[in-house]
Image (spheres, grey):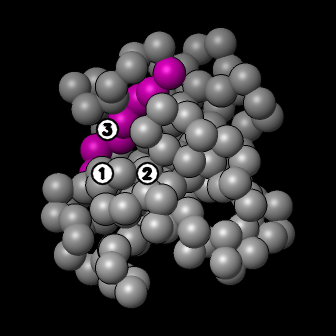
Amino acid sequence: MHHSRLCSIIIDCNTQDLDVAAAFWSAALGRPVNLEKSGNLDKYRALETPPGQIKCEVQKVDHPSRVHIDIETDDIEAEVVRLLRLGAKEAQRIKRWVVMKAPTGQKFCVVPPQLPDFPNGANRWD
């Protein structure tokens, strides 16, 4: 048995100036940039997450700009297998997460728990 749920929207930005991109998305979404929660400052800017809402980050990337989702889980391998059975494909393994590709082509990530209230509200899979 494992749990999973949507936890993050990641705004991938092909940019040389991550701070300018983060400032735009911060203003557009009304969420201040939080450098303390941003992790690797070369690649990420976390936006404040109001209680009970989905996390949002701005990420510097080398591929074309896009938006992707993260699914958090307490068992990455079990969640990857579940998604493969639904028709997804594994695209890449990166450190602690797995990049997947939906049958319709969208990429998304399976990540370890990100939000402090996990697994509240998560699906339970047997």
Q: Is residue 54 visible?
A: no
Please state the extent of the stretch shown in magenta in the rendering.
Answer: 43-49
> Vertically, is 21 above or below 7?
above
Judged by depth in the image, the label closer to the viewer, 1 or 2, is 2
Quote the CA–CA distance across marks 3 and 1: 19 Å
The numbered mark, 2 or 3, whose residue comes first in the sequence reads: 3
Total labels drawn = 3
- x%, y% of residue 96? 43, 39
The residue located at (17%, 56%) in the rendering is 116
What distance separates the C-alpha of mark 1 from that of mark 2? 8 Å
**Which quadrant holds residue 87?**
bottom right
| Residue behind mark 3 | 32
The answer to which quarter of the image holds residue 121 is bottom left
The amino acid type found where label 1 is placed reads Gln
Alpha-carbon distance for marks 2 and 3?
Answer: 24 Å
Instruction: Give the residue displayed 25% in from the left and 55% down from the top.
Output: 115
Q: Which residue is mark 2?
A: 111
Foreground disc of the pair 3, 1: 1
In what element is the residue under mark 3?
A: loop
Crowding at dot 2, Cα within 10 Å, few <14 / some 14-19 / many 20+, comes out as many
Q: Is 86 displayed left or right of 109 in the figure?
A: right
Picture layout, residue 55 above or below residue 86? above
| The furthest residue to the right | 104
- Residue at the spot of label 1: 114
- Give residue 90's position: percent from left, percent from top: 69, 54
**Quadrant of the image containing the N terminus:** bottom left
Q: Residue at x 39, y 84 (%)?
A: 125
The amino acid marked with disc number 2 is: Val
